[in-house]
Image (cartoon, helix red, strand yellow):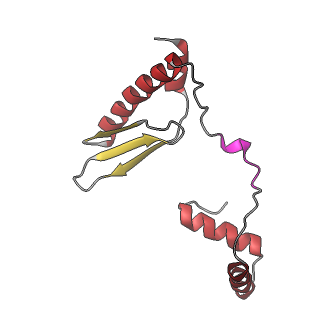
């Protein structure tokens, strides 16, 4: 196996598993577009995903494409700029004031709820 393929298989890519209505699982790799798989259970879906990653990386390398790096949480500063309509800005500020928190904390909490994250 090509060392670049082996490195991609060993990398800590973000794998997402979804339970399907039929009881099986679908899966994809967040950083690798088009890499997806399915299986009767998570183990099978994960094995199929490994095979899909290997095939995808081999094809991308043959085409001369770079393989994306896994997303690294350490590379994010925690700062972002958000543009929203003035009316929404006003409503958010009012809600934050009622709750006795900063607007920054209000947005952070709302985003945490939306993505299913726990507050640090």
Q: Residue 87's image quarter?
A: bottom right
Residue 6 seen in the figure: no
From the top left corner, tell me how far across and down residue 33 is, in percent: 49, 38
Above-or-below relation of 96 to 67: below
Residue, x 29% and y 53% (percent of image)? 20
Q: Is residue 69 visible?
A: yes
Q: Magenta residues?
A: 72-78
Q: Position of residue 22 (x, y in %)?
A: 21, 53
Q: Is residue 91 left or right of residue 13?
A: right
Magenta segment: does it hold 75? yes
User: Which quadrant would the N terminus be assigned to in this image?
Assistant: top left
Using the image, determine if residue 72 lies above or below residue 83. above
Side of 8 where 38 appears, left or right = left
Where residue 107 sits: x, y (%)? Answer: 69, 70
Instruction: Assess whether residue 97 is covered by the magenta stretch.
Output: no
State the residue at coordinates (75%, 75%): 103
> Horizontal and vertical percent for residue 80?
75, 58
Quadrant of the drawing holding the C terminus: bottom right
Report the front residue among 102 and 36: 36
Query: Relative to residue 31, is residue 26 drawn left or right?
Result: left
């Amino acid at each position: 196996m090509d060392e670049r393929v082996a490195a991609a298989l060993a990398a800590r890519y973000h794998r997402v598993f979804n339970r399907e209505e039929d009881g099986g699982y679908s899966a994809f790799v967040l950083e690798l577009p088009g890499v997806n798989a399915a299986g009767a259970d998570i183990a099978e879906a994960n094995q199929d995903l490994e095979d899909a990653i290997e095939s995808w990386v081999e094809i991308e390398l043959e085409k001369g494409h770079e393989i994306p790096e896994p997303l690294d949480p350490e590379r994010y500063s925690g700062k972002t700029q958000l543009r929203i309509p003035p009316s929404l800005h006003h409503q958010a500020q009012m809600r934050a004031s009622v709750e006795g928190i900063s607007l920054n904390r209000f947005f952070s909490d709302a985003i945490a709820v939306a993505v299913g994250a726990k507050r640090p």
